[in-house]
Image (tube, coloured by chain):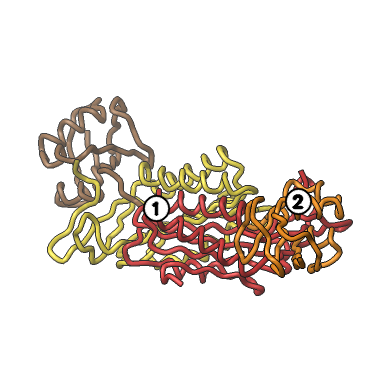
Chain colours: A yellow, B red, C brown, D orange
Amino acid sequence: MDKHIDIQLSALPLDPVHAENFVHHPSAGGIVHFVGTVRNQTQSKEVIRLEFEAYESMALKELKKIAVHVCGQWPVQKIAIHHRVGVVNVGGVAVVISVSCPHRKDAFEACAYAIDKLKETVPIWKKEIYKDGEIWVSAHP
Amino acid sequence: MDKHIDIQLSALPLDPVHAENFVHHPSAGGIVHFVGTVRNQTQSKEVIRLEFEAYESMALKELKKIAVHVCGQWPVQKIAIHHRVGVVNVGGVAVVISVSCPHRKDAFEACAYAIDKLKETVPIWKKEIYKDGEIWVSAHP
Amino acid sequence: MKVKIIAFGIARDILYGSELVMEIRDGSTIRDLRRILVRQYPELEKLRHFSFAIEDNYQDENYPIKDNQEIVILPPVAGG
Amino acid sequence: MKVKIIAFGIARDILYGSELVMEIRDGSTIRDLRRILVRQYPELEKLRHFSFAIEDNYQDENYPIKDNQEIVILPPVAGG
């Protein structure tokens, strides 16, 4: 894998520091990190935890596609995308995307694009567990 | 000071983790961090280090104004702005801005706004030191 | 011919399992398979949409399925 | 009246020091002070711009300076 790109699917808790350290670069002036955490509620329902399931081989491939595309569209020096699978409790980190660029505007755009695209194309599913039930997020209209 | 806002001017190295931990929040879904680091070059000149100087009392006040404005414009849960003063070597962290919101789009916008505004209004100056000279950044047209 | 269906997320719940071997007519396309699955598992039609992947790639509706292929049902994704 | 000028960044270099006590005419405004400083330190005019602050606030050109005030010269800022 390209040494400017770090893609991980992890069954263990994510530490955002790993993605951040990966993208550190002596000619980076702007580094933007997105950290997606599990909220304690969605639409007024109290969430207990999330369960992420991935079609892992394809998810890694789609995540890499996003990273490669981002590197082509913006002057990205390094990009890390780390996503959890398995159970994530409220407050836990579900995803970290870190991008370094010479200038901050590019880093903001590239990072925002990457998380948008991740939510569209990467075969990862999440189930929200409530006190009184559970639901596969976004499955139904 | 508002317990949702953490403003710091620091003469010691910044650890982005402190700002990140501050903004962690159980109903945050999107956290965006901007980390500005010292680049090893600007316009093809090799930078050895930066020196930041602040008019500290006013800088703290202007930083707080930005944070309060951001909290009014976007549904921000917590915001931390940490800025270095003194000598920062290449690769070192000059500024960290962390913002947590229920939704990521707001966090991206609020964080990008905060760093743009910081560069416009906060009385902090930086001198770039090269092998063969030095320059106050942005001082001249 | 035989195909192996692999299901994730809510599709796994709907199919009552993550794997399923089916007999389908030679020359079937993804479109044909979709029709067969929806007839057999009407809950699939209540999803916002669902796609198919073969060998880690999204496949379009005209893709001609080969004997013994593994075909993955992808319900609406929700990472992040 | 007396005013104390406090200079940061490149303004400190131009004024050869971070503090300077000046005698200016009673009733002077920031605009007047700017004119006096530029006459005395022509290098100030080569800056992209410079502003003034009193008691930690930016002040506009019409601000009437009071006796013994501390006035800060703010060259173009460059944080981040």
Camera-side residue of D54 and A9: D54
> Does B109 sit above or below residue A89?
above
Which label belongs to residue B74?
A: 1
- Residue B27 placed where, x, y %? 31, 63
Q: Position of residue D6 (x, y in %)?
A: 75, 66
Residues packed near mark 2 inside 10 Å, few (<14), some (14 to 19) or many (20 plus): many
In this picture, is A79 found above or below C48?
Answer: below
Residue C17 in the image: above or below residue D17 = above
Residue sitting at 35 percent across and 61 percent down?
B28
On the rendered structure, is A124 left or right of B112?
Answer: left
Same chain, labels 2 and 1:
yes
Count neighbours of disc 1 (C-alpha within 10 A) and say few if under 14, some if 14 to 19, many if 20 or more.
some
Q: Nearer the viewer, residue A5 or D7?
A: D7
Mark nearer the N terminus (2 vs 1): 1
Q: Position of residue C9 (x, y in %)?
A: 24, 51
- The C terminus of chain B, quarter of image: top right
Amino acid type, residue under disc 2 in the picture: Ala
The reply to whether residue A82 is in sight is no
Q: Secondary structure at mark 2?
A: loop
Q: Left or right? Give the position of D30 relative to D39.
A: left
Q: Residue at x 35, y 36 (%)?
A: C58
Look at mark 2 in the image and give the residue it sits on: B139
